[in-house]
Amino acid sequence: MNDEAKGKATLAARAGGFFDAASGGVVPPIQSSTTFIRDDDYNPLVPGNVYGRDHNDQVRLAEDILCRMEEASDTLLFSSGMAAIGTLLDWLKPGQTLLMQKGTYWGTTAYARRLCERRNIRLVEADSTETETFCNTLQEEQPAIVLVEVPSNPWILMSDIRAIAASCLANGCRLAVDATAATPLLMKPLALGADIVIHSATKAINGHSDVLAGVLSCRTHQDDLWQFIKEQRHDGGAILSAQAAWLLIRGMRTLPLRLERMCSTSQAIADHLENHEKIEDVWYPGLASHEGHELAKRDMDGGYGYLMSFLVRGGRDDALRFCANLKGIHRATSLGGVESLVEHRHTLEGELTGCPENLIRLSVGIEEPEDLLNELDSALSAV
Ligand SMILES: *Cc1c(COP(=O)(O)O)cnc(C)c1O
């Protein structure tokens, strides 16, 4: 892996410059062994390869590619996005405080609420888009970890990571940013001062709706939080399988190309829906009308992502009728795949997070933009 090229598309397309020295193949082999041989002196035959829960070559290669995309100090892969978040939050001790953005991904919200109650950790959920108030809360509460999501899912909110990071530094707490909807390419939370960046690689990083994976990357690996995370991944065993890592490496080869298309189509759809008579509101950071647009312009590079939410004029029934009318775009959870997906979040979240009943989350894929616009239009016209 001695590729000199700097471009992220080059890094991705060449899988970080990988070739298989044993066969000459340009694609990594899958080594699915759970255990590895020791030599006569009882040293591992291949340094670092002892047991499958510790590590494996496919996971190492995927981590190397992700680490370079993120420009991080170190990267670890987990068996899902929630396994990554669970490992991070496991650092919290009884009596400590977790300050979490209000309205983060419902899975994270549900997990954090249960963990904090069980372990006697104080959980404060606050609006992180109100930077000054949020930083005041941070100073008052003295949390051990601050957790923010950009752009958040499904509220599509932008937060000022740079300002929150400065406040975290001043108060001696760690900032973790879930940038799943931005991917490692559109935003660099670590460069803005975050300590840890989180991704559900199940989403756009893999991009083909066929792998569950999670990523944690750090700004500096000398941090004791990072040392805990490494230990916990090792001891707790939430590692990715060789087969899943292999698929992830394959999926990542086209990430920059997929994102380009997904971002430009998303912008076109958001522009179109914003002026649609059947739509009450569109939330997408690429719209000048979006509250976080200036922040997104400052902090995002190469596009505003593939995720948006919109409010169908009317109520729950109108939103569900729109979903039922769709021909082609699937009704299914998840995001970031090559195929576009819509979701009525309220059906999944219920009253847990206060999600509006007429909210539709749209994950934009790589289909022909014209087809997507036509499908959305005809489903809306029959609402
Ligand atoms: C999906 C998602 C997660 C959870 O990831 P899994 O891979 O499904 O465990 C976490 N954060 C965000 C923002 C997500 O969209």
Image (cartoon, grey):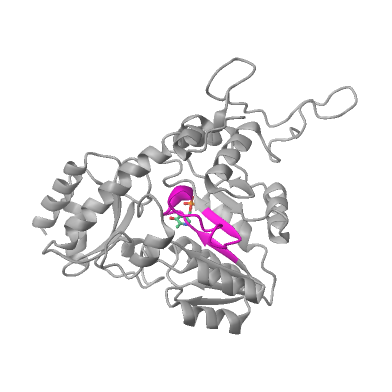
> Percent x, y for residue 81?
52, 52
Instruction: Single out the residue that lies furthest toward the left.
Output: 381
Quadrant where the image shows the N terminus: top right
In the figure, residue 260 lies in which quadrant? top left
Instruction: Single out the residue that lies furthest toward the top.
Output: 23
Q: Is residue 354 left or right of residue 46?
A: left
- Range drawn in magenta: 175-198
Q: Nearer the viewer, residue 265 or 300?
A: 300
Residue 91 in view of the camera: yes
In the figure, residue 154 lies in which quadrant? bottom left
> Percent x, y for residue 313?
16, 68
> Percent x, y for residue 10?
47, 33
Residue 107 on the magenta span: no
Q: Nearer the viewer, residue 14 or 351?
A: 14
In the figure, residue 320 lies in which quadrant? bottom left
> Percent x, y for residue 247?
49, 33
Q: Is residue 370 above or below residue 95?
A: above
Q: Residue at x 17, y 45 (%)?
A: 327
Q: Residue at x 34, y 40 (%)?
A: 338
Instruction: Report how many numbered discs are placed on residues in the image.
Output: 0
Quadrant where the image shows the C terminus: bottom left
Q: Residue at x 36, y 73 (%)?
A: 354
Residue 151 in view of the camera: no
Q: Is residue 347 left or right of residue 97?
A: left
Q: Is residue 368 left or right of residue 146?
A: left
Residue 191 on the magenta span: yes
Q: Is residue 14 above or below residue 374?
A: above
